[in-house]
Image: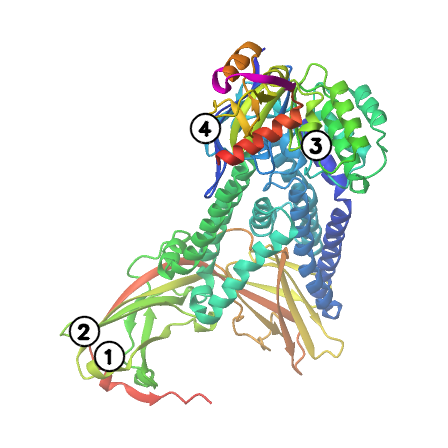
Amino acid sequence: MRQTLHIFKKDVRHLWFEIAIAITAVAAFTFTGARRALWLVDPVTNRTAAWTMVLILLPLAWWTLIARVIHDEALPGDRQFWITRPYSWKSLLGAKALFIFVFINLPMLLADVAIVRACALHPLGAELPGLLWSQVLLAIVFVLPIAALSALTAGFVQLIFAILMPCVIAVVVAIVAPEVVLGGFWNGTDWVRTYCLFLVIGVAGPAILVWQYSTRRTTAARISAVAAAILAVLGMTLIPWSVAFKIQSWFSKQRVEQPLARVDFDSGSKWLTRAVIEGNRVRIELPLNVSALPPDMSAKPEGFSVQLQTPDGTMWRADQALSGYASNMGQEFSLQITVDGAFYRKVKDEPMKVRGSLYLTVFGNPRSALIPFGDRSVLVPHVGVCAASQGANRQTYFLICSSGFRFPPRLVSYSFIQSAKETAQYAWTSPRSRSISYSPFPAEPGINPVSQDFALGSVHELFSEGRVDAVEAVAYIRRNFEIDNLRLSDFQISSAPASP
Amino acid sequence: MTDILRTTNLTKRFRKTVALDHLNMIVPEDSVFGLVGPNGAGKTTTIKILMNAWQPTEGNAEVLGRDSRKLSPQEFTQIGYVSENQQMPEWMTVEYFMEYLKPFYPDWDAARAQELLRQFELPPDRKIRNLSHGMRMKAALASSLAYRPRLIVLDEPFTGLDALVRDELIEGVLEGAEGATILISSHDLSEVESFASHIGYLDRGHLQFSEEMTSLVDRFREIEVTLANPLQSPISWPAAWLNTEQSAAVVRFVDTQFDQERTIAEVHRLLGNTHQISVNPMPLRAIFVTLAKAGRKAA
């Protein structure tokens, strides 16, 4: 421990300038972040440019600090003075970890507390799990990757090269085969893929650091790092979204038994039963109906797997996550399967059997809260702190909700009403089209400790207060369906408009 | 004497290049061991492996009785290492450098450290980056002598130094390394011949010999034989005779196993009657050059 502190003191003495830059960046972050709380009552205080700049500068300051402190006793090479001195690798690694904790994690922890408090949230109360988990994410996202790369490189130039090389490869692959890099967006379950990456970083990062500090076998450590990067990319791109949904279903809060939430073909909606010809491909649209849900629940389709089969065994399979947000919610849903033109022409007159599964998120536990106009913010349970205000011209209305460390896994809608007692007149009532994450963890990756969501109304009506409605994701379920004797030739046929 | 450094079949390959080839070397305790050899002979490779900066491909090396791959901070508290191309903490002042190293060594002698700084005329408040090469070497040496290490390893410490600084360093090493074993590598024999007690000669990864300086100087002689009669037929020279030159009346060679009686008898047996046999002791440099030439011829 004495050696750890001794090395730590040396690093502080040497890197005081970089420390000052990092602390200044955190101070600027705290100041602008806390000022953002004022948006709740006065949106004109928005300093987006300053905030954006701080969000860019802060990681750069951290990464410089991490690289400099690790390169101060560079591990690759055979000419460093310290390798023939009685350094204990545990003390050295401990000193670097202590340095990073003291000058990155601790200031950020305090900054988060200050910002969250400024937003009238309770960092040491309800937001404590988020506060602590955000520190874990900070380590995984911002510290470990750069610390591991710094331990594998002898200096800044090598480090920049090590960072740029995979970036260039990713950009090239993204241009040539975007699906490999992007892999489609999985809406609320996308966190599973992200946490696959975090798991690899969380395991490989410390392992590489310990291995490199204890043995200084740089070549082997670099090979391990490349293997970990490949594993992370494969994990990100090859994991099927249905597996992600299966994992998601472990976090269901309520059991929705089989008779509930049935999925059937909606044969009545003929106009939704279409085959849209798109060049060499045909998009088959099947209306499905989700029924038998309890009255206070609604369902949102997240994806499907489907199999079209003719009596002679010709088959087409599709399996995909659905893009689109909460506006897809409701009882009816259009299943869209894109098939090959040749397959379509071959099977369109055949009676087909369609077997499939629809993956649904079930929302329940509706909650509402009224937010009076003015300076007073209102704590809305499971949503955050909300405030409503009225513009100077009395025709513009703002409703802003802030939540600590992540936006809650709830669909939230905002509206303005004339009075709680009178008949409501909504300026804007549809569910917010923001993407929500169903992650069970109390914080989202990112620097900003406060997620803010807002509604802006500009109408000539006089409103007296805002209203926040929220429904919670309570279950993630899969429902199978079957359709017999479906003939694609019976579908309405249309052609997609040609691209300009 | 016990062995403070020992290598057994130590081999290091860099892809297809063999830098060390089954090196067996012993450095006895309390010796000043000069490891000499031309550039590229494998001296630095040997030292890097001994200091656990590199891993051997085969064989093993023991330092202070411990496998070099397992050298712990405990062993490094007893080792002082100075290298010509060592990267120093450039931002530190000389004084802070010494202060910084102090807690790492239980036997650090602060008074001795101050004395070394004075002896080497090192400016305490100057940053290492602003020191001349000679000053840097002095700073490195001072920082390696202040804790009275059992083993001092100096890898080409005098390269690029002027004669004055070199002498100061040698003086510093000899004064400061009382009771320590010193391993010093150099491509220039004259740098070490004045104070080494043992010499190891390394060439292309092979240790050609390793022995005490006195025995080495005793067994090498330059011999010139003036013949009474010209030689009639070619002669197969003994393996111990190197650099043999022959003219009608004179034969010159270097005897690497000189023994007055045996050598004279051998001369008479091979060359017959002689007018004169002149036996000259050889300076270490001449021995070194002879061995280098012989090695090149053999290769």
Q: Which residue is mark 4?
A: B234
- The kind of residue on which mark 1 rests is Phe
Q: What's the chain of the residue with tag 1?
A: A
Q: Depth check: A281 or A261 in front?
A: A281
Task: Tell if the residue under mark 2 belongs to the same chain as the one under mark 4.
Answer: no
- The kind of residue on which mark 3 rests is Pro
> Residue A313 appears in which quarter of the rendering?
bottom left
Distance from Cα at disc 2 to Cα at disc 4: 96 Å
Does B258 sit above or below residue A91? Answer: above
Which label sits in the foreground, 3 or 2? 3
* Residue ID at (74%, 47%): A19
* Residue ID at (81%, 42%): B130
The disc placed on residue B1 is none
Does A79 sit above or below residue A131? Answer: above
Q: What's the chain of the residue with tag 4?
A: B
Distance from Cα at disc 3 to Cα at disc 4: 47 Å
- The kind of residue on which mark 4 rests is Pro
Task: Give the x, y percent position of residue A456.
Answer: 64, 74
Q: Which residue is mark 1?
A: A343
Q: Sequence order check: which comes first, mark 2 or mark 1?
A: 2
* Residue ID at (61%, 69%): A420
Task: Tell if the residue under mark 4 belongs to the same chain as the one under mark 1.
Answer: no
What is the span of residues highlighted in magenta in the rendered image? B269-280
- The kind of residue on which mark 2 rests is Thr
Residue A469 appears in view:
yes
Distance from Cα at disc 1 to Cα at disc 3: 79 Å
Q: Which residue is mark 3?
A: B157
Please, what secondary structure does the residue beneath circle 3 have? loop
* Scheme by which the image is coloured: rainbow
Task: Give the x, y percent position of residue B84.
Answer: 69, 36
